[in-house]
Amino acid sequence: MHYQRYLLLLALLLPAAAMAQMKGMDMPEQFAFGQPAPESEATRTIHVEATDTMRLNFDAMNIRRGEVVKFVVSNSGQVLHEFAIGDESFRKKHMLEMRKQMAGMEHHDVNVLSIKGGETKTIVWRFDPLKSKSVLFACYVPGHFEAGMYHRHVMLKQALPN
């Protein structure tokens, strides 16, 4: 009879323990504007230059909904910059987080690169085929967004299959 109580207790505790373990796991984050993707799925590459004149310079910007793009981002300046892929909702949340953190701290969001002067980093992104209407590429280092270091992009319609 005691073993039935232990089995019941075990049945009640196992799901809670499993949920606690899942919280610690790296689960893919979901955003309305898309999600990270494996580099092998990228259909093309866009090069981006982050400059100390507070600009993000893209070599192409005709991104379609549903497309998987590899961004190669180079910081040609001396100061730390970010390259964030987001939307207006993410911008508000991220800027609030940046204000709370100490200057110079790097972020570890899946949609944000922190790039030191002279560095080049990559991020591969799958843009949502239905929800991605506009995307905001930005640097949220304090003062950089306000100085104009962002680009709003209206997504092109998804390409029709041949």
Image (cartoon, rainbow, N blue to C red):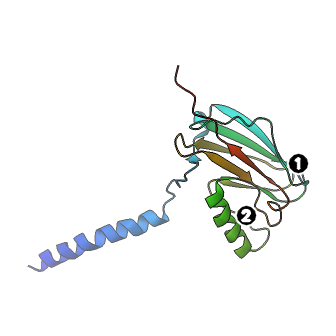
18 displayed left or right of 137: left
Type of amino acid at the residue the image marks with label 2: Glu
52 displayed left or right of 86: right
Mark 1 closeness class: few <14, some 14–19, many ≥20 residues within 10 Å:
some
Residue 101 in sight from this viewpoint: no
On-image quarter of the N terminus: bottom left
Residue 126 in sight from this viewpoint: yes
In this view, which residue lies farthest toward the bottom? 2
In this view, which residue lies farthest toward the left? 1
Residue 28 in the image: state x and y as whole percent: 51, 53
Q: Which residue is mark 1?
A: 76
49 displayed left or right of 12: right
Residue 158 in the image: state x and y as whole percent: 57, 33
Query: Please, is residue 93 above or below residue 77 in the view?
Result: below
Q: Residue at x 69, y 51 (%)?
A: 136
Q: Which residue is mark 2?
A: 106
Type of amino acid at the residue the image marks with label 1: Ser
Secondary element type, mark 1 = loop
Nearer to me, 6 or 25: 25
Residue 119 in the image: state x and y as whole percent: 82, 50
Secondary element type, mark 2 = loop
Residue 82 placement: quadrant: bottom right
Q: Are marks 1 and 2 in contact (CB under 8 Å)?
A: no
Mark 2 closeness class: few <14, some 14–19, many ≥20 residues within 10 Å:
some
Q: Residue at x 70, y 75 (%)?
A: 100
Q: Which mark is residue 116?
A: none
Q: Residue at x 67, y 32 (%)?
A: 44
Q: Earlier in the sequence, mark 1 or mark 2?
A: 1
Q: Residue at x 80, y 36 (%)?
A: 59
